[in-house]
Amino acid sequence: MYQYILSIHIIFVVCWFAGLFYMVRLFIYHTEAQEKPEPDRKILSDQFELMERKLWYIITVPSMVIVVAAGITMLILVPAWLQQPWMHIKLSFVIGLLVYHFICQNKMKQMAKGIYKWTSAQLRIWNEVATILLFAIVFLAVLKDTVSWIFGVVGIVLLSILLMAGVKIYKYYRTKK
């Protein structure tokens, strides 16, 4: 039974992250559409709002609910996992991911009201936060106690620096054109 629940958990983690990654990409396009003249801005904004709503409520939210339900089910089936230090850290990152999820939901609602608080560059950096959370959660789940926390922390910091450098380099070449 555990293996089936684990399989469902992994499948919907992939779906959830796909939704989160694409959602923020839509936010970037939606924000950049505000620089267009009318009627292009209105047409694009309406289309992005529709795409964001469908992606969020048809794929992203249901996937998140299934991931959380499957995760809780696995912890009920194997309660000893809750005694493991790596699981406490993993669950902390999962809580961070849930916070990320609901911040994205708030952004979607703000944009639907015509409120654009973040630039496209800030949204590109925001998109990398999900990547960092994904790396941390997967490495903790796979390596468990074999991971050296020092190397893990250094690895996450280096990954963050590389991702931010990539965003800056991309912005440089994008604005150079």
Image (spheres, helix red, strand yellow):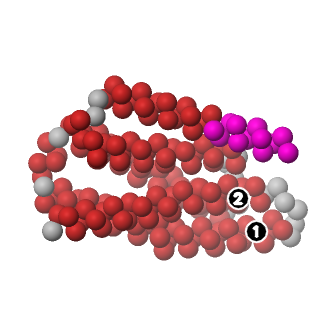
Q: Nearer the viewer, residue 1 or 37?
A: 1
Q: What residue is rendered at 79% in x and 69% in y? A: 42
Q: Nearer the viewer, residue 7 or 119?
A: 7
Residue behind mark 2: 29
Rendered image quadrant of residue 93: top left
Would you say residue 110 is visible in this rendering?
Answer: no
Mark number displayed over residue 44? 1
> What is the CA distance from the residue labelled 2 to the residue labelled 1?
9 Å
Is 55 within the magenta?
A: no
| SS under mark 1 | helix
Q: Position of residue 154 (x, y in %)?
A: 42, 27
172 on left or right of 81: right
Q: Nearer the viewer, residue 93 or 42?
A: 93
The N terminus: image quadrant: bottom left
Q: Position of residue 131 (x, y in %)?
A: 49, 47
Amino acid at circle 1: Leu
Range covered by the magenta-colored residues: 166-177
Is 172 within the magenta?
A: yes
Amino acid at circle 2: Tyr
